[in-house]
Every structure is written in C-alpha cells, then in structure tokens.
Image (cartoon, rainbow, N blue to C red):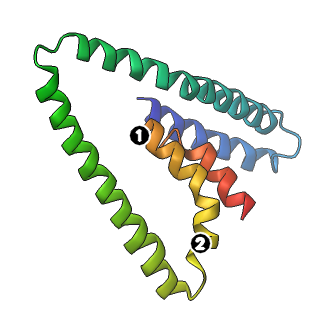
C-alpha cells in the first residue's frame, strides 16, 4: 500500500508540475528534501540502537538454552563458515575480479568501501546501509 501510494503521489506531483510550468515556484520539493533528511536521521538513530536490541535478543535466547556447550559449538561452526565465505568474497570478487576488469588497484577501492561493508555486516539490512553507501560513493 505504501509503495502504491508513493508511485501514485509521484505521478500526480509530476502532472501538477507539468501543468504549472515547472517546479521552481513549488514549496513541495524543498519540503520533501527536508522530510528526507528527517527520515534519514530517524533511520540512523534506529541503526544506532540495533546492536543493543540484538544483544538483548541473543541474551534471551542464551538464557533459555539447556546445553550451552553444544549450542556454542554449533555457533562456532557457523562463525567459521561465515568468515571463510566473507574472506573468499573479498579475495575473489572484490580483489581478483575487480582488478582484472578495471585494471586498477583493488585496495584503493576497498579503502572507500570498508565503512559501507561494515554497516552492512552490522545491521544486515540493505535499506539501512543506503546512507552510508551514498557517503562512500561521494567520497571516492
């Protein structure tokens, strides 16, 4: 419903701007830009609170376990598999393929990509990483 409303609102706004001869005199575009800044600030606040929420969920799940040794052994396997997959992703895709395709130094690319990748790893939400990714792209 939200996406449908956004599309309908955008189309209607475009038609109104076309009838009025442009959007130079409209107050809606500056208002929407300010609203975008407000929403990005709220999203950043939520992102900053996410680690504490995840910690409380993990603590609750650990507290309900009966055999912690077996549970942590399984978590250890998961951590090793995840780190191995991430290392292969960085080595093969981000370094090898990037270097071959662009004929440039992949370390320069990785230097600017680290904040966005760290945010993506920390919150596991592609929508939440958009502001950080935009900052990284603009700084290159």
Q: Residue at x 46, y 30 (%)?
A: 2
Q: Residue at x 65, y 52 (%)?
A: 134
* Circle number at residue 107: 2
Q: Position of residue 29 (x, y in %)?
A: 77, 39
Q: In the visual, does 70 lie left or right of 117?
A: left
For this orientation, the residue located farthest to the front is 69
Q: Vertically, is 130 above or below 93?
A: above
Q: Nearer the viewer, residue 3 or 46?
A: 46
Which quadrant of the figure contains the C terminus?
bottom right
Q: In the visual, does 119 lie left or right of 79?
A: right
Whole-angstrom CA distance, mark 1 to mark 2, is 24 Å
Q: Residues within 10 Å of mark 2 (few under 14, many from 20)?
A: few
Q: Position of residue 61 (x, y in %)?
A: 24, 16
Closer to the N terminus: mark 1 or mark 2? 2
Q: In the visual, does 73 lie left or right of 126?
A: left
User: Helix, strand, or loop for circle 2?
Assistant: helix
* Circle number at residue 124: 1
Q: Residues within 10 Å of mark 1 (few under 14, many from 20)?
A: few
Q: Position of residue 125 (x, y in %)?
A: 44, 39
Q: Nearer the viewer, residue 3 or 20?
A: 3
């Amino acid at each position: 419903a939200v996406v449908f409303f956004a599309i309908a609102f955008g189309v209607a706004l475009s038609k109104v701007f076309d009838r009025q001869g442009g959007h130079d005199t409209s107050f809606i575009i500056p208002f929407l830009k300010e609203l975008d800044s407000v929403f990005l600030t709220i999203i950043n606040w939520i992102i900053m609170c996410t680690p504490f929420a995840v910690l409380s969920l993990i603590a609750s799940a650990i507290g309900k376990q009966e055999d912690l040794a077996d549970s942590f052994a399984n978590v250890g396997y998961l951590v090793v598999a995840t780190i191995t997959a991430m290392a292969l992703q960085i080595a093969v895709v981000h370094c090898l393929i990037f270097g071959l395709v662009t004929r440039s130094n992949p370390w320069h690319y990785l230097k600017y990509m680290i904040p966005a990748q760290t945010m993506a790893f920390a919150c596991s939400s592609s929508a939440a990483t958009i502001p950080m990714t935009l900052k990284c792209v603009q700084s290159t």
